[in-house]
Amino acid sequence: MQIIRFRGENSKPQLAARTTEGQLYKLPFKDFIDMIECARRKKSTPLTLVKGILRDSLPVGRKLDELECLVPIEAEEVWAAGVTYEKSRDERNYESSGGKSSAATFYDKVYDAKRPEIFFKSTKKRTIGPGETVYLRSDSNWQIPEPELGLVLDHKGEILGYTIGNDMSCRDIEGENPLYLPQAKIWRNSCSIGPAIRLAESVEDPYRFQIICRIYRQHTKVFEESASTSQLKRTYEELCSYLASENMIFDGTVLLTGTCIVPPSDFTLQDGDQVEIEIPGIGILRNPVKSQINQSLEVK
Ligand code: DO4
Ligand code: MG
């Protein structure tokens, strides 16, 4: 069962459920958190609550691609785990050393350490949804999307659902000095999530998600690669427990679980590209790419 938000009547956001068969049903909640709170009040689970509503409703009768999908949750905070896949460790070593060093690096150490790398990625206003534009930094010449599985958490760090995330990254800024990480990771529209939240209870094995990333330039596919969450070095529970430890978590916090796909080292995103990240069972997250030059500095 997937939960989405779309632009409904009078342009108002409408929460909806999408069944495995692709049928859409409106849900009588303000947003995803409102739905979670209602399930809690009724001492039910989100899936049981939604199934009960669907039993008494008629489907919307429109297909997903006929709707304007919105960010599925306006998360107060998005956090991210890093170097959780071998691929990420190897590419981080490459960008920070130009491929020369053979000594153990911060990245080798964190890949094997008990404590994972967890960093702050985004806030509600910096996070965009399907169809919205991800921006490029004007002070970087080496920028990539990082396709990642996102965990949608409750205030205790328990997993409510799964979404797709793009942890946009500047390889040259991070490669120059790991202390520049916040600048390599956080800027206007540098994080995208969506298009749906797959309820955790409806997922048989979350370590069997396939992640596919495609990048289009002038309508031509210039990159495609796929990987699986089965290659993740850590468990989701481990990542959540480090995030929640001594911390304060809000209902709906998103934790991105690290990238398992990195485009070739001579690749950088360009103005006009389109990034597509697909996780079968969750959907396809598409975002056009634009350079920030000439973008209004107003906050949305
Ligand atoms: O160490 C820097 C960040 C790594 C990251 O974002 C990832 O592995 O996905
Ligand atoms: Mg990442």
Image: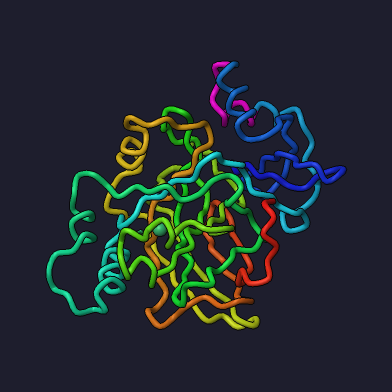
Farthest residue in the right direction? 10
Residue at x 67% of width, y 40% of height:
17
Seen as rendered, the residue at the extreme left is: 103
Q: Is residue 2 visible?
A: yes
Q: Is 287 left, or right, of 254 in this rendering?
A: right
The quarter of the picture where residue 261 lies is bottom left
The quadrant in which residue 159 appears is top left
| Residue located 66% across and 45% down the image | 4
Across and down, in percent, residue 56 comes to: 75, 27
Does residue 201 appear in the picture of this structure? no
Horizontal placement of 278 versus 101: left or right?
A: right
Instruction: Identify the residue at horizontal 23%, vertical 44% (top origin).
Output: 115
Which percent across, then down, holds residue 42?
59, 16
- Residue 13 lies, with reference to residue 290, above or below; the image says above
| Quarter the N terminus occupies | top right
Q: Which portion, as a residue range, is magenta?
A: 42-51
Identify the main secondary structure in magenta.
helix
